[in-house]
Amino acid sequence: MLDIKITLTQNKKEKPDQSKLGFGRYFTDHMFVMNYSDGAWRDPRIEPFHDLVLSPAAMVFHYAQEMFEGMKAYRAPDGTIRLFRPDMNAKRLNRTNDRMIIPQIPVEDFIQAVKTLVKVEEDWIPTAEGTSLYIRPFIIATDAQLGVHPAHNYSFIIICSPVGAYYAAGINPVKIFVERQYTRAVKGGTGFAKVGGNYAASLIGQKEAEDMGYAQVLWLDGIEHKYIDEVGAMNVFFVIDGEVITPTLEDGNILPGVTRDSCIQLLRSWGCKVTERKLAISEIAEANAAGKLDEAFGSGTAAVISPIGELNLDGNKMILNGGKIGPISQKLYDELTAIQWGKKEGPEGWSVVVD
Ligand code: COI
């Protein structure tokens, strides 16, 4: 159990208009900070939100030894504050930390830190339809030294941001460009870990796709550029002839999404056939040509369920489900958001009350 010292701000910010939140543009009044030194995490505290003071030699700036997580707090109709499967984020954080040689944080300490900050910031949880408080825990290596080695000093920080939809399109289908040239991750690398480096590697593809009018790119495997990985900010699902197929986690290239896992569990509980396997992009093109590609969607904490309306593969534009949201995407969106916002009882342990 952490002994969290709380210092409240004397200068509360004005809250933004809930109808214009967008994603990750506003930050709340406080942040959680805990430092690692001499072999232990110490000094857990909540402080007024502030800029960081770091040496320009801090290792995070040079060798990107860092990680992050993404989760949300929701205001339920009964007034309670809910988190969605926070234990999954805590466990994933530690799997990422192991890959990045960052010291682990006990699951219960992580959840306590998140809950305590969310409680302090509860006035910031927006209540408008589809809005929530996005929570961004992250860890950075702070040692001031330029040799390439794992650091000895770290800061674990949590910030919060009231958000609306991740994509400007909201729940409307997004256009995705299939990336053939660049690679996001490769077997043995950090694709399964939530680290900034994966996103840095994706920026050039993302920019080129955006310049062509696409919301994101669909990453293919880094060896053959043949098998589907993920969409950077989302995992992906395809519905072919009634069967739901999503890329397997086995190669370690893709993020084990909390929303991905929740979708699989919900779909199976409804009796849908869900298969996790290697999925070649050529299969998608063939299924589409044969009229068997029913629908496709992305899943993520930020993106929730985001239907895919168009896939551009080598200049061929595949329009999915007439560019409209498909029935499975819609059902998953409705069910998942009802559970997350505490409007409906979900599986045991999914909706966690912050008290
Ligand atoms: C999330 O869905 O929480 C993410 O971290 C994806 C993206 C915003 C980087």
Image (spheres, rainbow, N blue to C red):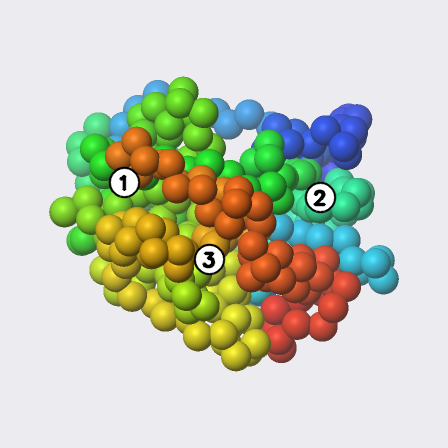
Q: Are marks 2 and 3 in contact (CB under 8 Å)?
A: no
Residue nearest the viewer, comparing 191 with 300: 300
Taking the view exactly as shown, the residue that stands out farthest to the right is 78
Give the left or right position of residue 22, taking residue 285 as reference.
right
Q: Earlier in the sequence, mark 3 or mark 1?
A: 1
Q: Foreground mark, 3 or 1?
A: 3
Give the left or right position of residue 53, taking residue 342 as reference.
left
Residue nearest the viewer, comparing 229 with 75: 229
For the point 26% across and 34% down, the residue is 314
Instruction: Answer few, some or many: residues within 10 Å of disc 3's Cα (few below 14, many 20 plus, some between 14 and 19).
Output: many
Residue 230 spot, x, y in % from top left: 36, 49
> Which corner quadrant holds the C terminus?
bottom right
Disc on res. 184 = 1
Residue 191 spot, x, y in % from top left: 29, 49
For the point 40% across and 55% down, the residue is 291
Q: Earlier in the sequence, mark 2 or mark 3?
A: 2
Instruction: Answer few, some or many: residues within 10 Å of disc 1's Cα (few below 14, many 20 plus, some between 14 and 19).
Output: many
Disc on res. 294 = 3
For the point 72% across and 58% down, the residue is 341
Q: Secondary structure at mark 2?
A: loop
Residue 83 spot, x, y in % from top left: 65, 59
Q: Is residue 324 visible?
A: yes
Q: Are marks 2 and 1 in contact (CB under 8 Å)?
A: no
Find disc 2 in the rendering and name its residue. 131
The three-letter amino acid code for the residue at tag 3 is Asp
Instruction: Answer few, some or many: residues within 10 Å of disc 2's Cα (few below 14, many 20 plus, some between 14 and 19).
Output: many
Taking the view exactly as shown, the residue that stands out farthest to the front is 290
